[in-house]
Image: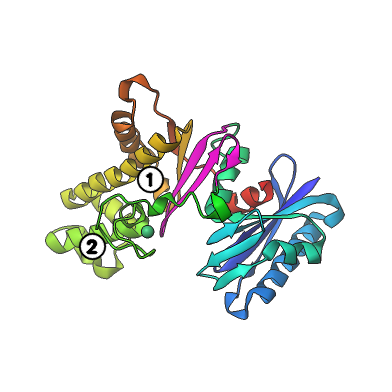
Amino acid sequence: MYRIGIDLGGTNIAAGVVDESQHIVAETSVPTGAERGAEAVVADICRAAELAMAKAGITAAHCASIGIGSPGTCDGSRGVVVRAYNLGWFNVPVCDMVTARLGLPCRLSNDANCAALAETVAGAAVGCRNMVLVTLGTGVGVGIVSDGKLLEGVGGTGAEAGHAILVLDGEPCTCGRKGCWEAYASATALIRQGRRAALAHPESPMARCGDALTAKDVFDAADGGDETAQAVLAQYYVYVAAGVTDLVNILGPEMVLIGGGISRQGERLLSPVREYVAANCFGGHDRLPPVIEAARLGNEAGIIGAAAL
Ligand SMILES: [Zn+2]
């Protein structure tokens, strides 16, 4: 049997047919066009699923289920997107709508959760029953697999570790609080840290980028020997690692994976994070720190994880 995975994003809807070996055998993508409203978007989710099935040369009769990874707060038990600001969705019963059209059982979860699940079935954490995926991008997304199951909290409201406080009364966060981990460890935060350092050190090559500074510019400046950029990164790694240490202390996972654009820095990021976690996690020398690696799946994680729901 095949399963269908839908990666619902603010820009595109990606649909894929996934086989029993977790390979995407066919996929398609259509623009989301969220401004058209939920009915039209859900109709396109179904159309994309049908297109992907047609490409794979199968019909719904060959499929066991369809899974959807959505942004925002998703209540998996009811199949409802409770709140997704970038889609403008509130309490949309997506699963019932999809099942009515395609006749397939439908499951729904948050995109960060789907990415974590994908790593356990086809990525860097295959066979791992207790793991955390931290995605460092525009924000900090966290997906937690505990005893082989997604840890989603009541009504899908949990696992939002990006909004745990790292610095009380610290930097403002998009969620309205101050000092969230996301406000220090996201790629957006790294850019802000780089801009601030460049203002204080106009001799840094980062200063030439002005407001156009990217996370890559900070890494490039550090590679070129710029001590200001090197200091920004050293501090950034501590912000990332301190939050990872909290997750390790709370969950005691076997493995922590780091994904998102920043994770392309590989060992340069992973090695200081490993060192910090090993030195600071509760239990110190008496416990083995978890394995900390880069996530392995890229864009396909959304489809594979959604299908695995
Ligand atoms: Zn926050």
Residue 167 magenta-drawn? no
For marks 1 and 2, the one nearer the N-term is 2
Q: Main secondary structure of the magenta part?
A: strand
> Which residue is the site of mark 1?
265
Residue at 41% across, 58% down? 139
Could you tell me the amino acid type at mark 2?
Arg
Residue at 31% across, 42% down? 242
Could you tell me the amino acid type at mark 1?
Gln
Q: CA distance from mark 1 to mark 2?
A: 20 Å
Q: Is residue 247 visible?
A: yes
Q: Which mark is residue 195?
A: 2
Front in this rendered view, residue 272 or 226: 272
**Residue 91 location in percent, x, y?**
60, 68
**Residue 262 location in percent, x, y?**
39, 50
Residue at 48% across, 40% down? 132
* Residue segment shown in magenta: 128-151
Q: Say which quarter of the image contains residue 150.
A: top right
**Residue 37 location in percent, x, y?**
62, 77
Query: Above or below — where is 162 with respect to 13?
Result: above
